[in-house]
C-alpha cells in the first residue's frame, strides 16, 4: 500500500462586509471541521489597540513591530471589540504598510497550518485567491447592527442601535 507523501491541505476563505456573520460562520466551520481559524479583522484591531496604547502614534516601524508581536492568544483580548478600536482599525487598515505587515502574518499562518479557515474582507481576492472554498457572507444593515450591538452590550459599552447602524453604514461605505 502506498503512503501519503503530503499532508492534507484545505483552505477556506470567508469574506463579507462588517458584522455580516463571517467571523461567527468561520469559527463554526473551523470548529466543526477541526481546522485552525484566523480573523483578519482581529489583526487590524490588535494594531489599532496598540496604537491607542501608544497615544495614537503609529508609523511603519511601529506597525511592523506590532505585527511581529502578534500571537493567536493575544488576538483573544476582549478590548479588541471596543467601538474606539473598531473605528481606528478601519482607519489604519487603509494604510498600505499596515496591510503589507498583516498580509505577511496571514500568509505565514496559512502556510504553517494546513487546514484553515481565514475570514476577512479581502481574503478570497488578496490573501487566499486559490482557496479551496470561498464563502461570501451577506446580511441586512439592521441585522448587522443588532448583532454588533449585542457584542457591545457584552462589553458593557453604552451605545444605541441607531448609532451602531450609522457606524456600520459609514464603515461599509469607507471599506468599499
Image (cartoon, rainbow, N blue to C red):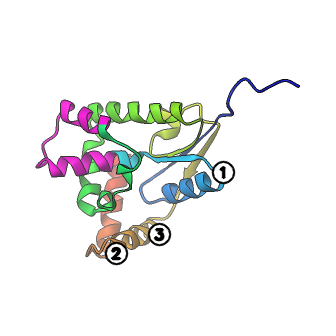
Q: Which quadrant of the rendered structure holds the N terminus?
A: top right
* Disc number placed over residue 153 in the picture, else none: 2
Front label number (3 vs 2):
2
Please tell me how crowded label 3 is: few (under 14), some (14-19), or many (20+) other residues with Cα within 10 Å: some
Q: Residue at x 55, y 32 (%)?
A: 129
Identify the residue position indicated by label 3 in the image.
143
User: Does 123 appear in magenta?
Assistant: no
Residue 87 at x, y = what percent?
26, 55
Residue 155 is tagged as: none
Q: For residue 46: magenta?
A: yes
Residue closest to the far right: 1
Tag 3 secondary structure: helix
Q: Nearer the viewer, residue 120 or 155?
A: 155
Q: Secondary structure at mark 2?
A: helix
Question: For residue 116, which quarter of the picture?
Answer: top right
Q: Which mark is residue 33?
A: 1
Q: How far apart are labels 1 and 2 at the CA level? A: 30 Å
Q: Are marks 1 and 2 in contact (CB under 8 Å)?
A: no
- Residue 32: image location, x then y, percent: 65, 56
Q: Is residue 146 left or right of residue 115?
A: left
In the image shown, does 122 or 165 lie closer to the viewer? 122
Residue drawn at (36%, 36%) of the image: 102
Magenta region: 44-68
Circle nearer the N terminus (1, 2)? 1
Above or below, 29 against 109 in this view is: below
Classify residue 107 as left or right of residue 85: right
Q: CA distance from mark 3 to mark 1?
A: 27 Å
User: Distance between the Cα atoms at labels 3 and 2?
Assistant: 15 Å
Q: Name the residue rendered at 30%, 48% in the picture.
A: 46
Coordinates of residue 122 in the picture (x, y in percent): 45, 40
Amino acid at each position: 500500500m502506498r503512503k501519503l507523501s503530503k499532508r492534507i491541505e484545505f483552505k477556506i476563505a470567508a469574506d463579507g462586509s462588517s458584522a455580516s456573520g463571517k467571523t461567527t460562520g468561520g469559527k463554526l466551520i473551523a470548529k466543526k471541521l477541526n481546522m485552525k481559524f484566523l480573523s483578519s479583522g482581529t489583526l487590524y484591531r490588535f494594531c489599532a489597540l496598540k496604537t491607542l496604547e501608544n497615544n495614537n502614534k503609529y508609523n511603519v516601524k511601529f506597525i511592523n513591530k506590532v505585527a511581529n508581536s502578534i500571537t493567536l492568544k493575544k488576538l483573544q483580548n476582549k478590548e479588541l471589540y471596543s467601538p474606539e478600536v473598531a473605528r481606528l482599525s478601519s482607519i489604519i487598515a487603509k494604510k498600505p504598510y499596515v496591510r503589507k505587515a498583516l498580509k505577511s502574518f496571514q500568509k505565514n499562518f496559512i502556510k504553517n497550518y494546513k487546514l484553515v479557515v481565514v475570514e476577512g474582507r479581502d481574503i478570497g481576492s488578496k490573501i487566499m485567491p486559490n482557496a479551496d472554498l470561498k464563502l461570501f457572507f451577506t446580511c441586512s444593515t439592521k441585522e448587522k447592527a443588532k448583532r454588533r450591538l449585542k457584542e457591545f452590550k457584552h462589553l458593557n459599552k453604552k451605545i444605541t442601535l441607531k448609532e451602531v447602524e450609522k457606524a456600520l453604514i459609514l464603515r461599509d461605505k469607507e471599506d468599499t
